[in-house]
Image: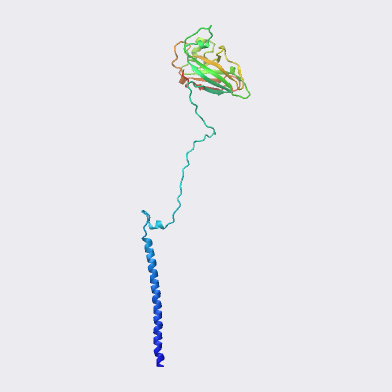
Amino acid sequence: MIEKIRRRPVRASLVLCIVLSLVAVTVLAASCGGTTTSKKATNSSTAKLPPGVTGSQASQPAQQSTATTTPASTAPTSSSGTSTTTPAQASSPSASADLVGGRFTIVNATRPNTNKSAVSSSAREVPGDYLELEFTVFNTGTDSLIDLSQYSFRLTSPGIAADTYTDYYGTNGTFGAYIDTNEISGTLLSYSDLTPVTYKVKVGETISKVFLFYDLNPLTDAPNAGVTKDNTQLIIYKASGTDYGTQVAIPLSGYSF
């Protein structure tokens, strides 16, 4: 009986030692795990970062860059859908204008000091200041004739004194007749026989070798300094027939007279 009592404390002590050993192992394992985690955290916080980058920026996911392109500028488009070009200016420009199916083009402009080219050899040659305009006329229509007798060819310039023409020419308005203060009319003539051109032009037909001849200073043979190419224009006026009263103007500034 006494032997049994002595063995119980020994067994209790052995159990207590085993329990303490297990507790010590658990504590040691937990202590080692905490140390490892601490080291990892320390290594992460002390990692070297690029210049100007903070730890919070380094932890953010990289963003995809978006490139912005600016389209190349394009030429403006006309609202009418048509392009406009500026033709090269020739030394003797052929300015033209369309009126009621007729295309009138001034192919040459000169300023002679005698009326020789506008009168027959039997007529008296008179010195003075004149303007000679050579023409072509083209019928741009599709089914209508052009009656040139229905057109009036007028010259306007601040230097023209229209009320002085009757003093020299009377009722003959071949080389100038009163229209307005600074505006006169003339007669379209043929180079071949110097007669008035009053015939009809067919569709698609072009007539040439016709001209206008204006006396710029009917009271004297001196040059009219008030008439210059920059302040003078030809006005083609529909004097009768279809579209009566309409007109177009052709400036003479591009010509070298």
Q: Is residue 166 shown to the viewer in this render? A: no
Q: Is residue 207 above or below residue 74?
A: above
- What's the coloring here? rainbow
Q: Position of residue 170 (x, y in %)?
A: 53, 10
Q: Is residue 25 shown to the viewer in this render? A: yes
Q: Is residue 33 above or below residue 166?
A: below
- Residue situated in front as seen by the camera: 123 or 2: 2
Judged from this view, the residue extending furthest toward the right is 143
Q: Position of residue 20 (x, y in %)?
A: 39, 79
- Residue situated in front as seen by the camera: 103 or 36: 36
At 40% from the left and 72% from the top, the residue drawn is 29
Q: Is residue 110 above or below residue 85?
A: above
Image quarter of the N terminus: bottom left
At 39% from the left and 89% from the top, the residue drawn is 6
Q: Position of residue 146 (x, y in %)?
A: 60, 20
Q: Position of residue 228 (x, y in %)?
A: 45, 18
- Residue situated in front as seen by the camera: 96 or 204: 204
Q: Is residue 253 above or below residue 38?
A: above
Please give the count of numbered marks on the rendered protein. 0
